[in-house]
Amino acid sequence: MSIDERSELEAADGTSVMVTRLAPALGAEVRGVRLAEIADETGDHEITTIEQLLLDHMVLFFPDQHLSVDEHVAFGRRMAERADGELEAHPNLKNAFTEHPEIFELAASKGGIADEWHTDLTFQESPSLMSILNMVECPDVGGDTMWANLCLAYDGLSAPMRDLIDGLTALHDAQAHGRPEKTAIHPVVRVHPLTGRKALYVNEHFTRRIVELSHHESEPLLDMLTTWVSEERHTVRYRWTKGTIAVWDNRCTQHHVLNDFVGERIIQRVTITGDHPAGDPERSLPQWEPSVQRGAATGRFDYQLARHLRDH
């Protein structure tokens, strides 16, 4: 499917679906489909179209949907089935208002503003492969969200830099949620299982260090990579309206909220997990510092990594 500025598709019932591209890097707005009506087998055509559009654009926005919690979860389950994944509530954070085992809810009035660049749940062995967000309440001005195209970010690096980071891995943790002991190691560059494209898979919120490098080598490189991701040329910015549904591919994107608003902002999200990041063959375990070897004493910079290597 070509990625035109605006294209018109045909739904199964013969109606038109309008797709409008939002930025050169990624993102499209989709109108003319009712997500509440395609959760069962009768929606196969629409689901297939959404899956292809997601591969093309990485993040999709469906304005004026106004889904109930049950409709939101039903649509999420349908997408999860197609992706061979499952829905999972947030493993660390509690909902602001709505109790539901498959809904994650953030409210600005309760401190819920995800204002650092991140890919969802990368501190888990099987991070989120897809997220589906319902904008329940949003301010009239501000509170936009930005997404970055991680494949474009990788492609834009110089050849020597790509050669350096291919095959490296990084330690991620849930320190931002008060759980620094919850850790996982993933490729610095992952390969998308459906498109085959390489994506720069490190983020400022959850990624702590590059495993194969010393702390002093890792710090400047990781800082450069996470800053590079957020370059404007890699991004799209979306202004919300109440009732909009957003669907994004966590295997090739990052996002963050602009914390520039006053008033309430409430989002509800279903998260599809089940994916295990894969990249180029990994290089050998770190040999740069004896203190990280299994069972050895560790310095303060290396303790967390040494514990992960010991326990896994």
Image: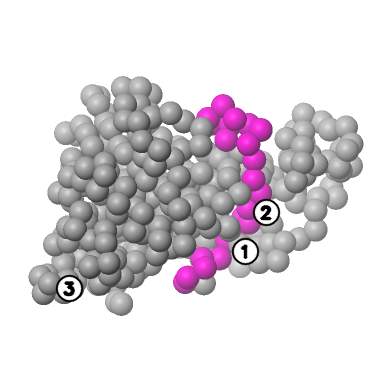
Instruction: Indicate the amino acid at tag 1.
Output: Gly
Do labels 2 and 1 touch, CB within 8 Å?
A: yes
Q: Earlier in the sequence, mark 1 or mark 3?
A: 3
Nearest to the eye among marks 3 and 2: give it: 3
For disc 1, the neighbor class at 10 Å (few under 14, some 14 to 19, many from 20) is: many
**Residue on which the image places disc 3:** 12
- Foreground residue among 283 and 44: 44
Residue 206: x %, y % from top left: 56, 40
Q: Earlier in the sequence, mark 3 or mark 2?
A: 3
Residue 90: x %, y % from top left: 46, 38
Hey, which quadrant is residue 3 in on the image?
A: bottom left
For disc 2, the neighbor class at 10 Å (few under 14, some 14 to 19, many from 20) is: many
Mark carried by residue 169:
2
Above or below — where is 182 with respect to 54?
above
For disc 3, the neighbor class at 10 Å (few under 14, some 14 to 19, many from 20) is: few
Tell me: 192 left or right of 170: left
Mark carried by residue 279:
1
In the rendered image, which quarter contains the N terminus? bottom left
Mark 2–mark 1 Cα distance, whole angstroms, equals 9 Å
In the displayed image of the protein, which residue is found farthest to the front? 41
Mark carried by residue 190:
none
Above or below — where is 60 with respect to 159?
above
Task: Report the span colored magenta.
Answer: 174-195
